[in-house]
Amino acid sequence: MEQKTKYESIVLMGKITCGKGTQTAVIKEQFGGTMFSIGDKMRELTQMDTPLGRKVKNAYEEGLLAPNWLASYWMMHALLHRHGDDLLIFEAVARKPDEAEIFNEIHEWTDRPYIVFNLDVPDEVVFERSAARNRDTVDEHKTVEKRLEEFNEFTTQSLEVFRNTGKVVDIDGTLPIEEVTQIIFSHLNA
């Protein structure tokens, strides 16, 4: 049986390997809705032998975030055209401050309540989890360093945009998965 929440958008943010994907899957299982991931969109494009696909593949393999215009396009399309009435569970969306401002503006203008969960993990845990996961080139040490640099340069500012609106719940991402889930659910059920 699906649980209900007052939120129409749920955002999971944090560094690589913090548990965003794991928690997104658990939230979707319990609350339904549609999962949306910029990372998944990037990985899809890397498989396309097109000028855009090749450019995205190079950026992805270097550990760079999606350009603002592309990430914002995907985000706006999901919110305004494709899934406007659905519960949307976003994994790592609005990772640059301009994107966070657009995300917030859309939600305020459409009266769509949202919440942001920031799963915080130290850099050493990121390196350990990336080495253990070894999913693709993104988990290589050099790429992880670049992704952490991108997080510190951009995503920390996005979190501040959301924090200034009172939307962020900071969670220790090193806690056991079940404890992180309990904290998230306590906010979703409030």
Image: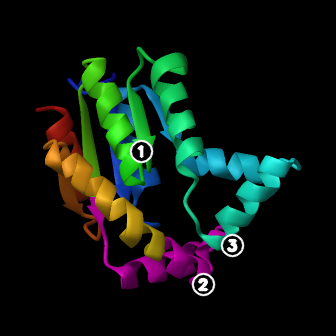
Q: Can you tell which of label 2 and label 1 is closer to the viewer?
A: 1
Q: Earlier in the sequence, mark 2 or mark 3?
A: 3
Which residue is found at the position 47% from the left and 82% from the top?
127
Q: Tell me the magenta residue range.
A: 119-147
Q: In the figure, residue 140 lies in which quadrant?
A: bottom right
State the SS at label 3. Answer: helix
Using the image as rendered, state which of residue 19 and residue 167 is in the foreground.
167
Q: Can you tell which of label 2 and label 3 is closer to the viewer?
A: 2
Asked if the residues shown at circle 2 and circle 3 are in contact, with their CB atoms under 8 angstroms apart, the answer is no
How would you classify the magenta stretch by its main secondary structure?
Answer: helix
Asked if the residues shown at circle 1 and circle 3 are in contact, with their CB atoms under 8 angstroms apart, the answer is no
Q: Is residue 23 above or below residue 80?
A: below
Residue 73 lies left or right of residue 7; in this view the side is right
Q: In the figure, residue 1 lies in which quadrant?
A: top left
The residue labelled by disc 1 is 99
On the question of residue 47 being in view, the answer is: no
Which disc, if any, is residue 142?
2
Q: Can you tell which of label 1 and label 3 is closer to the viewer?
A: 1
